[in-house]
Image (cartoon, rainbow, N blue to C red):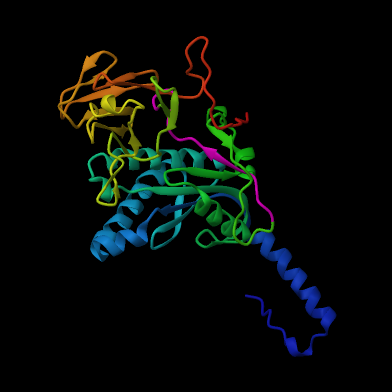
Amino acid sequence: MTDLSVDLETLSLTDIIRLQNQLSQVLSRKFERRLALAFSDIVGSTPYFARFGDQAGRKLQQRHTDLLQAVLSRHEGRIVDTAGDGAFTCFPGADQAAKALIEVQALTANENISQPPEHHLSLRMGIHFGPVLTDGVVVTGDAVNLCSRVAGSANPGCISLTSEAFREIADISLRLKCSALPPTPLKGIERPIDLMRLEWRDANLFPTHVRIEETEEVIALPDQATIGFGRLAVKDGIKANDVVLNLPDEEESKKISRWHFELRRHATGFVLRALTSQVTEVDGKSVGKGEEMPIKVGSVVSVARAMSLRFISPGDERPGESTVYEQTTVFV
């Protein structure tokens, strides 16, 4: 090995600046790579630890890590680092990163079905593509910090990505799953940046809204594994239902059970589970208490024969109808 030791104390200011430039050039040439970076964070881990204790909290973190490890190798990815409720991963390209994170979210949703709601794992994720310094083990650079903040800005159960990551995606089917978000302020970034949301669920399988036919009210379905529907809003200071079902006619509303039914997200779509012996019908078929029935885009649920709910997605309107949704732009 060549002896590169230099007596820095003997160097002039000009010599030191030249040496810095030479080192920067060598560092970039040997270690700079352009990679797809991804962060995955557990939502609500701090209150989860406080409520259920360290053992349950560590089990939740391990579920997160195990899901990532089960998926990453299929998409040429690897875990760079884990720290508590977060994981930093990298991939050779944005397509691999997007496909991997979609698969992790889908597996998480499917696994949550067998877990009580209070033990559901919810992840927020972010993808960025840019230059980093890496020796094949350590990955560092401004792009890493940016990606971490992108993940932190995502809603629970969602995947956000930067415009740089979007431009690197070659798969048109993945591009069609991306829609623009409002300019997003990120900590340490001077101006709000343009981010996109990567929709990991199949829009043809999962309705995004429910319309109450009697009042024409349209309600966005919460982005969670189990969604409760019923007449009761609050019980003992705790939210009783995610979608509260009430009509202007109080007597008609009383026909609806306090907890009427719930929707559960399976990998292949929603399933309705009746929680009451009161009438529940899906597309004209009766669903008894404890029984289940698939829900698809366009399905109509009769609640106690007092209210009809149509499950819809943007563009699902019937002829002559129009529904106002929050504006979403899709880029190809």
Left or right, 175 with respect to 193, comes to left
Q: Residue furthest top?
A: 319
Left or right, 258 with respect to 123, comes to left
| Residue nearest the observer in this picture, 227 or 249 | 249
The quarter in which the N terminus is drawn is: bottom right
Q: Residue at x 34, y 27 (%)?
A: 247
Establish if 285 lies above or below 33. Answer: above
Q: Position of residue 210 (x, y in %)?
A: 40, 27
The majority secondary structure of the magenta stretch comes to loop
Q: Quadrant of residue 24?
A: bottom right
Q: Position of residue 98 (x, y in %)?
A: 50, 40
Q: Residue at x 36, y 40 (%)?
A: 224
Q: Quadrant of residue 20?
A: bottom right
| Residue nearest the observer in this picture, 130 or 48 | 48
The quarter in which the C terminus is drawn is: top right
Q: Position of residue 322 (x, y in %)?
A: 53, 18
Establish if 205 lies above or below 163. Answer: above
| Residue nearest the observer in this picture, 109 or 141 | 109
Q: Is residue 203 magenta?
A: yes
Q: Residue at x 69, y 79 (%)?
A: 4
Q: Position of residue 280 (x, y in %)?
A: 22, 22
| Residue nearest the observer in this picture, 155 or 102 | 155
Q: Residue at x 23, y 31 (%)?
A: 260
Q: Is residue 135 magenta?
A: no
> How many labels, in total?
0
Which residues are drawn in magenta? Answer: 191-206
Q: Quadrant of residue 57?
A: bottom left
